[in-house]
Image (cartoon, rainbow, N blue to C red):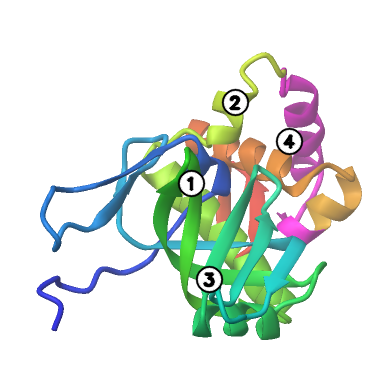
Amino acid sequence: MSQFVPTPPILLYIVDIINGKVAKEGEDKFSRWMLTSANGEKVYKVRITGTVVNKYFSPASEDKKAFASISIDDGTEVIRVKGWEDDATILNDALEESDEAEIIGRPRVSEDEIYLFPETVLKNEDYNKELYLRTKKIKRYAKKDFVISLEQTMETKDFQKEKKLIFNIILNSENGVDLEELIDQTKLAKSTIEAVIHDLLNNGDIYEPSALKYKNI
């Protein structure tokens, strides 16, 4: 029986994982793997959402275990989710390329590659849930004053044009604009919109009068 107290999964942007560090807490056999995210957060269990952009499956044979991996892209980075034996079968059966996925897994590292070992693998067919989770990430990062790591890896990119575009849409909307409308109207990558929304919320330029909707102060 495990001596560890169960920990809730933490909703992160993938680039925050990729730019972090994964290591064991100690040297003994009971030591847990822990992710230190790019924002310095200590995480044992990760929750991510994104699109399946690649899938690989190798069935079991006499000399090797079954193995599967899926690559998830959330617009900020791509990470692999890897499974062996029964977990490989679950991964292979649960998702196909282009599916929207929700993964809960534990961070691991092998040969400098950070990946996730799956605990829960879901195909997300509810667009409202997808939007809810995106907004939840934005609000979580804003509340903790975290930097979205997309900005850390793209320090030379100037978001002023995108900020002006998004802010003007919100400013000119009498009843506010939801995330889906911003994606549709701007044609920008959802990761860029999330980064801008995070910044506008953090600066007090806009607020969220109701779930998934943003309005000028």
Dot placed on the residue nearer the N-terminal end, 1 or 4: 1
Q: Where is residue 132 in the image (x, y as percent from the top left)?
A: 60, 68
Query: Would you say residue 77 sits in the magenta stretch?
Result: no
Residue contact between numbered discs 2 and 4, judged by CB atoms under 8 Å = no
Please indicate, yes or no, whether residue 97 appears anywhere in the rendered image. Answer: yes
Using residue 70 as the reference point, say whether residue 9 is left or right of it.
left
The numbered disc on residue 99 is none
Q: Position of residue 41 (x, y in %)?
A: 31, 43
Q: Mark 4 points at which residue?
A: 167
Dot placed on the residue nearer the N-terminal end, 2 or 1: 1
Q: Name the residue under label 2.
A: 153
Under mark 4, the amino acid is Phe
Using residue 71 as the reference point, say whether residue 65 is left or right of it.
left
Residue contact between numbered discs 4 and 3, judged by CB atoms under 8 Å = no
Q: Mark 3 points at which residue?
A: 83
Residue contact between numbered discs 3 and 1, judged by CB atoms under 8 Å = no
Under mark 3, the amino acid is Gly
User: Label 4 neighbourhood size at 10 Å, few (<14), some (14-19), many (20+)?
Assistant: many
Under mark 1, the amino acid is Ile
Secondary element type, mark 3: strand
- Is label 3 or label 1 in front? 3
User: Label 3 neighbourhood size at 10 Å, few (<14), some (14-19), many (20+)?
Assistant: many
Residue contact between numbered discs 2 and 3, judged by CB atoms under 8 Å = no
User: Label 2 neighbourhood size at 10 Å, few (<14), some (14-19), many (20+)?
Assistant: few
**What separation in Å lies between label 4 and label 3 (alpha carbons)?**
43 Å
Q: Position of residue 158 (x, y in %)?
A: 72, 18
Using residue 1 as the reference point, say whether residue 138 is left or right of it.
right
**What separation in Å lies between label 3 and label 1 (alpha carbons)?**
14 Å
Q: Name the residue under label 1.
A: 114
Q: What stretch is highlighted in magenta?
A: 158-180
Using residue 185 as the reference point, say whether residue 157 is left or right of it.
left
Please indicate, yes or no, whether residue 199 appears anywhere in the rendered image. Answer: no
